[in-house]
Image: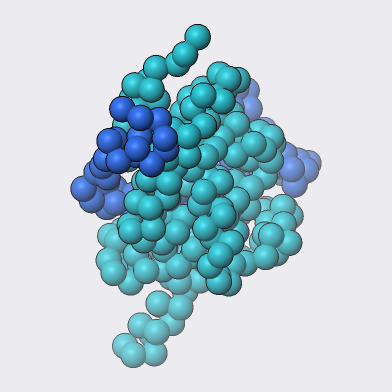
Chain colours: A blue, B cyan
């Protein structure tokens, strides 16, 4: 893809390529197209890197919750309440 | 054939940590998350006989958990961003006039109290069905198909909601960085 070819892509195509790249769900041809898109188009590159960073920060936040003690089930109590017996 | 109750217990034990984290981010605190988890287990035990195996057991459990979350959320007064406003993010992302790459900004390198609050507040403003899609897909690593099945929506619906949620959170983060820098410039 030449530098100005991204202008020929529709809005839906650009969104699908950027999200597909984030999700690692693109075929090799589409991945090449997406990589060229973010290489030559600064707006798309910015979109991709900042979306990636946003996801990364929420994953870091998740790992903070992971350190919290694991919840427990009281199976006897739950079975009794549900009427399932022992 | 009667399905052994132990099979259900095994699945609940396997999924409980993930379910707890999603519930925590859905309702905002660990106590409510634990209540949702217990309620999910109780409903699953009560309805186990009616489970026909149309979906995987874990998918069925996430469907119960998400419905439990949604019904609790409806009782709470929140001020979420409107779904119609999120549709704004379907416009051309390459049309933004000023590209700003803040992904390497020092403010985003370490999660401190301020950033943590901001991340939690931003995700808390998303409508329930957008928030849970983002949490399941991007944070917990469910596939599009698993997410769609658990939430009883189509895969394309998952994709649309995920894109809008990502864009909203990204923009909120950008605003936070801009305002933090503005404050620093004023005081510095």
Q: Position of residue A34 (x, y in %)?
A: 60, 35
Q: Position of residue B103 (x, y in %)?
A: 42, 56
The correct choice, above or below, for B111 with respect to B67 in the image is below
Q: Which residue lies most toward the top here?
A: B1
Total numbered labels placed on residues in the image: 0
Residue under the point 41% across and 61% down: B28
Residue A52 shows in the view: no
Residue under the point 48% across and 43% down: B65
Q: Position of residue B110 (x, y in %)?
A: 28, 60
Q: Which residue lies most toward the bottom here?
A: B187
- Residue A22 lies left or right of residue A53; in this view the side is right
**Quarter of the figure that contains the C terminus of chain B:** bottom left
Residue B187 shows in the view: yes
The correct choice, above or below, for B14 with respect to B132 in the image is above
Residue under the point 52% across and 32% down: B47
- Residue B10 lies left or right of residue B137; in this view the side is left
Q: Position of residue B121 (x, y in %)?
A: 45, 67
Is B169 or A3 nearer to us in this picture?
B169
Is A40 or B83 nearer to us in this picture?
B83
Residue under the point 56% across and 35% down: B150
């Amino acid at each position: 893809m030449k530098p100005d070819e991204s202008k020929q892509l529709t809005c839906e195509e650009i969104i699908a390529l950027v999200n597909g790249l984030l999700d690692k769900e693109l075929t090799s041809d589409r991945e090449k197209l997406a990589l060229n898109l973010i290489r030559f188009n600064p707006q798309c590159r910015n979109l991709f890197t900042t979306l990636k960073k946003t996801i990364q920060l929420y994953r870091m936040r998740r790992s903070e919750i992971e350190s919290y003690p694991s919840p427990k089930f009281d199976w006897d109590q739950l079975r009794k309440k549900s009427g399932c017996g022992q | 054939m009667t399905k052994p109750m132990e099979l259900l217990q095994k699945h609940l034990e396997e999924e409980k940590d993930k379910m707890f984290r999603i519930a925590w981010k859905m309702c905002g605190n660990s106590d409510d998350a634990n209540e949702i988890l217990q309620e999910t287990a109780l409903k699953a035990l009560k309805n186990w006989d009616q489970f026909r195996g149309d979906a995987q057991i874990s998918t069925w459990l996430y469907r119960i958990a998400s419905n439990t979350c949604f019904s609790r959320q409806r009782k709470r007064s929140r001020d979420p961003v409107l779904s119609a406003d999120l549709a704004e993010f379907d416009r051309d992302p390459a049309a933004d006039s000023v590209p700003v790459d803040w992904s390497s900004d020092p403010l985003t390198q370490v999660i401190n109290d301020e950033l943590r609050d901001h991340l939690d507040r931003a995700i808390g403003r998303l409508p329930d069905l957008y928030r849970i899609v983002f949490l399941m897909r991007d944070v917990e690593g469910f596939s599009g198909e698993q997410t769609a099945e658990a939430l009883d929506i189509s895969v394309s619906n998952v994709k649309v909601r995920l894109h809008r949620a990502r864009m909203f959170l990204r923009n909120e983060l950008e605003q936070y960085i801009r305002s933090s820098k503005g404050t620093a410039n004023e005081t510095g």
